[in-house]
Amino acid sequence: MSKVWIGLFRGVNVGGRKMAMKHLIAALEAAGLQDVRTYIQSGNFLFRSALSEKDLERLIDGVVEKTFGYHSNLHLLTLSHLETVLKDNPYRDREHTGKAQHVFFFKAPPSHVDRELMDSLKADSEAYEITDELMYLYAPDGIGRSKLVEKIAKAIKADMTARNLNTVETLRDMAAELSA
């Protein structure tokens, strides 16, 4: 039985790590994934497969290495996981949504979280919540100016990738459509 998966690559189409989405779709479909779709150029994709998460990670990393010449930093999610992320968002009722809210997905629980550093860096308008799986960030003034976001890798030791709330909601909607 095939299942719908959402893939999030970290660090593509920045810093010389190019990944043309049309080439990604062709390569993943040639490798046996079904109904591959992408969303914007920042490494968001959806597909169907009956393979396990570990098998998919190995397969997709091999495809990326062969097609684009580098190893991928991939986070795989399910539709039910994204639905839970959105339902549990502590900032979902705030005035500013969309690009003012971000979800940082952790591949595994962080090995270290320096909350003291985070609290010293965050602006008065910012707020965050951290679990073993992710961090919710509310940044109504944008993340471009956020000192917290600028130093996040110093404060949180984890393999992570972030998406704004608009992207998370769109990926959830696309996954729901694909699973219907």
Image (tube, rainbow, N blue to C red):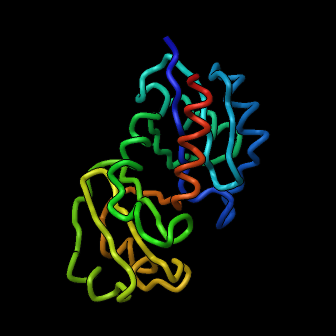
Residue 30, relative to residue 121: is it above or below?
above
Q: Residue 5's spot in the image, x, y percent?
A: 51, 31
Camera-side residue: 150 or 137?
A: 137
Q: Looking at the rendering, which quadrant does residue 105 occupy?
A: bottom left
Camera-side residue: 85 or 122?
A: 85
Q: At 50% across and 72% down in the image, what residue appears?
A: 96
Residue 100 in the figure: left or right of residue 25:
left
Residue 66 in the figure: left or right of residue 112:
right
The furthest residue to the top: 1
Q: At 76% across and 31% down in the image, what residue appears?
A: 26
> In what quadrant of the picture does the C terminus appear?
top right
Residue 91, relative to residue 32: is it above or below?
below
Q: At 68% across and 59% down in the image, what residue appears?
A: 13
Residue 28 in the figure: left or right of residue 72:
right
Q: Looking at the rendering, which quadrant does residue 128 occupy?
A: bottom left
Q: Residue 122's spot in the image, x, y percent?
A: 35, 84
Q: At 53% across and 79% down in the image, what residue appears?
A: 142
**How many discs appear?**
0
The furthest residue to the right: 22
Q: Residue 71's spot in the image, x, y percent?
A: 55, 46
Residue 137, relative to residue 27: is it above or below?
below
Q: Residue 113's spot in the image, x, y percent?
A: 23, 68
Camera-side residue: 39 or 110?
A: 39
Residue 98 in the figure: left or right of residue 25:
left
